[in-house]
Image (cartoon, rainbow, N blue to C red):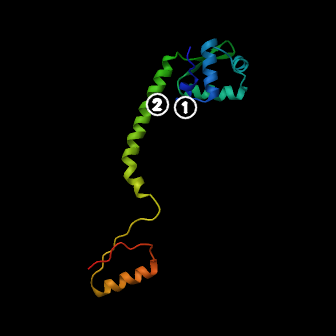
Amino acid sequence: MKDITPILKSLGLLESEIKTYLTALKNGPSTVIELTKSTRLSRQAIYVAIENLTERGLMTSLMRGKKRFFAAEHPDKLLSYAERKQHEMSEHISDLKRSLPELELRIGGEKPVVKMYEGKEGIRATLDQIKIDRPKQVYEIAD
């Protein structure tokens, strides 16, 4: 069987979440202690992984007597989650495309400057400005 871990990582799942999900999928409904033993993760890491997986709709919990069991959702839910992520990403891309002109205006650094002056006062102002700015290159001063 192909290793599914890289695919799950590409969906944004953490290593602890992947181990927890795959172990719960393999073992069926399990307690946190059973998941801790099977995955060799700390209880705290298991609780965080379960919470994150539950928020993503990939894990559920159920009570049997006084014990809480956690179960991985059917793998079809992984596909649904991936499709949701893809839809969200396409929305982010379209938002970014709309924001590009505004972002381009924020580009820092040296920007080209074009100034137009007229008459004798314009020539004096241009020469004074060149003395002040001391640019490396002046491309054109024309009549």
Residue at horizontal 49%, vertical 20%?
77
Location of residue 35 in the rendering, given as x and y in whole percent from the top left corner: 69, 19
Location of residue 123 in the rendering, given as x and y in whole percent from the top left corner: 32, 84
In this rendering, the answer to whether 123 lies above or below 54 is below
Per the image, the residue denoted by label 2 is: 85
Q: How many marks?
A: 2
**Mark 2 crowd level (few <14, some 14–19, many ≥20, 10 Å Cα):** some
Residue 28 in view here: no
Query: What's the CA distance linking mark 2 and mark 1?
Result: 9 Å
Where is the C terminus found, in terms of image quarters? bottom left
Element at badge 2? helix
Q: Which mark is residue 12?
A: 1
Residue 119 in view here: yes
**Mark 1 crowd level (few <14, some 14–19, many ≥20, 10 Å Cα):** few
Give yes or no for contact between labels 2 and 1 (Cβ–Cβ under 8 Å): yes
In this rendering, the answer to whether 143 lies above or below 3 is below
Left or right: where does residue 35 sit relative to residue 77? right
Quarter of the image holding residue 92? top left
133 or 105: nearer the viewer: 133
Left or right: where does residue 35 sit relative to residue 93? right
Left or right: where does residue 121 sit relative to residue 41? left
Location of residue 141 in the rendering, given as x and y in whole percent from the top left corner: 32, 77
